Amino acid sequence: MTPLAIRQYTATTALGRGRDAQLNAFRERRGGLRPNDFGNEARLDCWIGRVDGLETEALPTALAQWECRNNRLAWLALQQDGMQAAVAEARERLGATRVAIVVGTSTSSIGASEEAYARLEDGQFPADLQRPIVHTPHSLGDFLRQATGLRGPCVTVATACSSSAKVFAQAARLIDAGLADAALVGGVDTLCGSVLYGFNSLGLVSQAQCKPFDATRDGLSLGEAGGFALLERMDGTPALALRGYGESSDAHHMSAPHPEGLGARLAMGDALARAGLQPADIGYLNLHGTATPANDTIEAQAIAAMFPESLHASSTKGWTGHTLGAAGIVESVAALLALEHGVLPGILNSAQRDPACGAQIRFDNQEHRIRYAMNNSFGFGGNNCSLVFAAA
């Protein structure tokens, strides 16, 4: 593929707001998980990655129609690291209709819908929640369109946990097809009852802090996050670039990966081929690594079959929690920080190595310069995506 420049990027997670908060937490090995304190009713006994202060954030008056927790986090994330200014500059330079929006989420504004049903008045939504736009999956994309003034193609991707990784691939195709010259990509997902109780009903939530690839791992910790990147055609030698993407579908099971990691291997191989790279070229791989027993084993075996033992591969879900539809952008930001600063995070909370997982799985941090990084995001239904990023 023709590489795309990454002009700006940011993430807001349980580790804090913006890139520096993520980078400093990685350097200090300071995680963002805490005992579940979300919601007012009886709470699940688990740990979560919650964004501090989100409840007191407010949207501008002109955007009040989109008010909900998810769009508040989208607005908050957009204010970090000069992202909104970079989008405005691209809009003015290229034209509003030439900049696309492609964003991922899993539940979008469903928390507002949960509240509306809980507060039904004579069978009707309460007056303050009779706003149809916050009860649709496209609420996130529509909100960002209004918040940024961009008028190019606007897409909300919902492929579970690969959503905001697949936005990079979809944006690259839009630009390659000449439908846009740049794209705001990213994703936002927030905590809500459907997420917490839904994943708990599947038996996937740990009562302790998640421990990716640890021999005693027993499930995931859920989190919330928002993040963005601005992609654009190459002009000169940008500091960071999207070099490749690979997508695949397991077509195996609604919630379980292919037992031999077929979909994961296809996605990673396709991303490397599109980037024109070999496995040994990758210096850091951010794994999907949910901390569930089956997923981690299968991903680790796929990694061991493709990459040399020298690869530094880790999951950052012990730091932020599993941010679902935002995981793709959050973990892409971790890969971009590794390229920019040479900080390769290890795995937080994990201590006991699983003999079923290979030497590539690293619990400890490393610091050294690398040229290429990869990010894996694998969603329910076998929606897989791998991304390759490069430093100049």
Image (cartoon, rainbow, N blue to C red):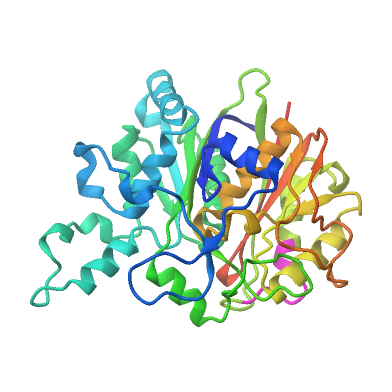
Judged by its main secondary structure, the magenta piece is loop
> Residue, x 63% and y 73% (percent of image)?
219
Between 251 and 64, the residue placed more toward the observer is: 64
Residue 26, picture quadrant: top right
> Residue, x 14% and y 58% (percent of image)?
128
Residue 23 in percent (x, y) is at: 64, 38
Which quarter of the image is occupied by the N terminus?
A: top right
Which quarter of the image is occupied by the C terminus?
A: top right
> Residue, x 12% and y 72% (percent of image)?
124
On the question of residue 12 being in view, the answer is yes
User: Residue placed farthest to the right in the image?
Assistant: 309
Residue 120 in percent (x, y) is at: 15, 73
The stretch in magenta equals: 256-264
Residue 102 belongs to the span the image colors magenta? no
**137 relative position to 318: left or right:** left
Between 352 and 139, the residue placed more toward the observer is: 352
On the question of residue 165 being in view, the answer is no
Residue 259 belongs to the span the image colors magenta? yes
Between 44 and 278, the residue placed more toward the observer is: 44
Residue 215 in percent (x, y) is at: 79, 73
Between 33 and 283, the residue placed more toward the observer is: 33
Image position of 370 with respect to 88: above or below: below
Image position of 83 with respect to 53: above or below: above
